[in-house]
Image: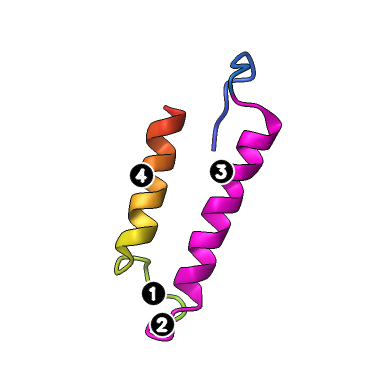
């Protein structure tokens, strides 16, 4: 993730919140009993939507 340091709209708590959401979504995918470790994360629409929405907010 790249953050423009001159952008004061993104505060520390907002960045922490974004990473927390990313971590929680990633953990949900890894804990899925149908996920094979080492496979690409392609079958999780919820994970893809969360990452896409995060990128839209930042960009």
Q: Earlier in the sequence, mark 1 or mark 3?
A: 3
Which residue is the site of mark 2? Answer: 36
Mark linked to residue 8: none
Mark linked to residue 52: 4
Residue 20 among magenta residues: yes
Q: What stretch is highlighted in magenta?
A: 10-36
Q: Could you give the CA–CA distance between mark 4 and mark 2, rounded to whole angstroms? A: 23 Å
Quadrant showing the N terminus? top right
Q: Could you give the CA–CA distance between mark 1 and mark 3, rounded to whole angstroms? A: 24 Å
Q: Earlier in the sequence, mark 4 or mark 2?
A: 2
User: Does residue 12 sit above or below 32 in this rendering?
Assistant: above
Which residue is the site of mark 1? Answer: 39
Residue 24 among magenta residues: yes
Q: Is residue 17 left or right of residue 22?
A: right
Q: Residue at x 31, y 65 (%)?
A: 42
Residue positioned most to the right: 12
Under tag 1, what secondary structure?
Answer: loop
Q: Could you give the CA–CA distance between mark 2 and mark 3, rounded to whole angstroms? A: 26 Å
Between disc 4 and disc 1, the foreground one is 4
């Amino acid at each position: 993730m790249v953050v423009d340091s001159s952008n004061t709209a993104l505060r520390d708590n907002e960045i922490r919140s974004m990473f927390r959401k990313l971590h929680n979504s990633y953990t949900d995918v890894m804990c899925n009993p149908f996920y094979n470790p080492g496979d690409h994360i392609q079958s999780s629409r919820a994970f893809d939507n969360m990452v896409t929405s995060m990128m839209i907010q930042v960009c």
